[in-house]
Image (spheres, grey):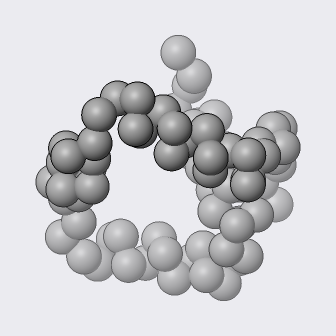
Amino acid sequence: MIADIEIMNRGIACLIRELGIVETEAFISYLKNEKFDYTKWRKDKFDDMSLSEIGKAAAEYESKHPFKGNAKVI
């Protein structure tokens, strides 16, 4: 299992790469200020999808957004 700090670093690096620094800060602020329930969101988003549908969607996303790996946090 990956250490907590590594998960945080990789997550922030992904956000910065995809959103930029300013929007990443805004995103984190939104999460801190909103009563966001990830479990409810996940159920609402994925409960009607089969495992193969989720896999297909993930594969399509990956083909359009290839993982570059080893992103560094500034």
Q: Which residue lies furthest to the top in this view?
A: 1
Number of residue marks: 0
Residue 1 on image: x %, y %: 53, 15
Quarter of the figure with the C terminus: bottom right
Q: Identify whether 61 is placed above or below 20.
A: above
Q: In which quarter of the image is residue 12?
A: bottom right
Residue beneath the point at 61% across and 81% down = 23
Residue 19 on image: x %, y %: 67, 74
Position of residue 68 in the picture relative to residue 51 (left or right): right
Q: Identify whether 16 is placed above or below 14.
A: below
Residue 58 on image: x %, y %: 54, 41
Q: Identify whether 62 is placed above or below 20.
A: above
Residue 11 seen in render: yes
Residue beneath the point at 40% across and 29% down = 52
Residue beneath the point at 29% across and 78% down = 33
Of 63 and 23, nearer the camera is 63
Of 31 and 69, nearer the camera is 69
Residue beneath the point at 81% across and 38% down = 69
Residue 38 seen in render: no
Position of residue 35 in the picture relative to residue 7 (left or right): left
